[in-house]
Image (spheres, grey):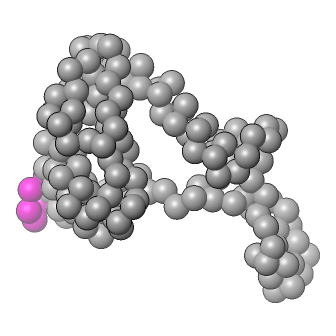
Amino acid sequence: MKGFENKRPIGNPLKEELSAFGGERGRYLAEKLQSALPAISLTTHVALITAVANDTDANLIFAQQIVGYGNVGDILIAISSSGNSQNVVDAIITAKAKGMIVIGLTGETGGKMKLICDILINVPGKRTAYVQELHLPVYHTLCLIVEHFFFGNERH
């Protein structure tokens, strides 16, 4: 939703519209706002997560959001140290049914996710804390690749 390592200035016509509509403040916004790609963390909508967990099944907290947010061709990045977390597996099943692409990050074996992800990145570890540490450079690298692809390689 904002720059990771690259500068992402917004382009015209938004820059011009901000300046025209907002005067001095609009020019400030045009200078400071950054181009973005739509991204949603499925772990942060606490009210929805508790509603789904209370009203249906806690394992459906991510799958329900995929129903609402997911579109054909969207990408789900699914993370589970074991590859067997039912709530993550259910989200993947739902994403695949909606025509989404799934990139999975798991530990050494890949678990159930190895059979249902389009791309599986399984790091060489079994202990949860170690797997999570190994995932950090992986998703930073994914962010860099995506940012470079869409916004070029200009560093600030």
Q: Which residues are magenta?
A: 54-58
Quadrant of the image for the N terminus? bottom right
Classify 24 as above or below 115. Answer: below
Q: Quadrant of residue 11?
A: bottom right
Q: Position of residue 37 (x, y in %)?
A: 57, 58
Q: Is residue 78 left or right of residue 109?
A: right
Q: Is residue 7 visible?
A: yes
Residue 56 located within the stretch drawn in magenta: yes
In the depicted view, which residue is nearer to us: 25 or 127? 127
* Rendering coords of residue 67 (x, y %): 25, 67
21 inside magenta stretch: no
Q: Is residue 28 left or right of residue 33?
A: right
Left or right of residue 150, residue 105 in this image: left
Quadrant position of the C terminus in the picture: top right
Residue 78, above or below 114 = below
Residue 44, image x and y in percent?
Answer: 38, 53
Residue extending furthest toward the right: 24
